[in-house]
Image: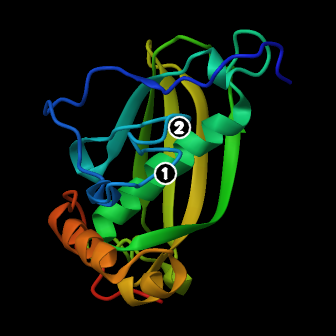
Amino acid sequence: MHSHSAEPQPAEQTPEGADGEYLPVPWSVLADYRCFGCSPHNPNGLRLRFAARPDGEIDTRFRLGRGFESYPGIVHGGLIGVICDETMGNLIVLRTGLTALTTGMRMRYVTSMRIDADYQCVARLLTTEADAGSTPVGAGGLVRAESEILDSAGGLVASASATYRPISMASARERLDLRSDEFDQIEAALAATQVAGPAPVAGGPN
């Protein structure tokens, strides 16, 4: 339901993480990168930025305007899923050094998200006891993650859990519409932007 016609506005960013710096998203090395979730070049996107947290987590802080509205004053629920998926997906890319494709996601909506209010999404990897301290990739080559969206008072707004399939750069070169030199740039950026946490996957599944 869209009760008002308004041009989409990018998400407003609130102050970055405790270390005062945002994590460089590997895809940002491309001049024309247009990810709806995290590209600063997409005029209709969310323009999310991510900061490192303790224990290898990442978060993003944001405020959505009326261009992302559903019922009057309430953010469209589908965008809450986008934010959770974007935060978990970028965590996995930064932790494994591989592109990761979403294979499934489950959402839990606790309360509505308000327009023009401050929120935070926090993402973390889920590992079994056997995985702990070794690699974030679990059974079947899938990575599991979870995220929470919190309001400015720390109250839970929504949560999500998801599975992702990392793909090697060789496989990504076959699937994505990029030139060889652009893939070379991304591969170098991935190698340089690892978030602290369990050891990254060597090679990874295809």
What residue lies at 34% left-to-right and 59% top-to-bottom? 27
The answer to whether residue 62 is above or below residue 45 is: above
The answer to whether residue 70 is above or below residue 199 is: above
What residue lies at 19% left-to-right and 58% top-to-bottom? 196
Q: Quadrant of residue 192?
A: bottom left
Q: CA distance from mark 2 to mark 1?
A: 7 Å
What residue lies at 22% left-to-right and 57% top-to-bottom? 195
For the N terminus, which image quadrant? top right
What residue lies at 46% left-to-right and 16% top-to-bottom? 118
Which numbered disc flags the more N-terminal residue, 2 or 1?
1
Kindly state the secondary structure of the residue where label 1 is placed.
Answer: loop
Residue corresponding to mark 2: 45
Which amino acid is tagged 1? Cys
Kindly state the secondary structure of the residue where label 2 is placed.
Answer: loop
Circles 2 and 1, Cβ within 8 Å, touching? The answer is yes
Which amino acid is tagged 2? Gly
Q: Residues within 10 Å of mark 1 (few under 14, many from 20)?
A: some
Give the percent coordinates (x, y) of residue 88.
46, 52
Left or right: 181, with 156 as reference point: left
- Snapshot colouring: rainbow
Q: Residues within 10 Å of mark 2 (few under 14, many from 20)?
A: some
The answer to whether residue 34 is above or below residue 20 is: below
Give the percent coordinates (x, y) of residue 197.
23, 61
Left or right: 102, with 33 as reference point: right
Give the percent coordinates (x, y) of residue 181.
28, 78
For the residue pair 202 and 101, the one nearer the viewer reads as 101
For the residue pair 69 and 155, the one nearer the viewer reads as 69
Residue corresponding to mark 1: 35
The answer to whether residue 40 is above or below residue 103 is: above
For the residue pair 1 and 183, the one nearer the viewer reads as 183
For the residue pair 133 and 145, the one nearer the viewer reads as 145
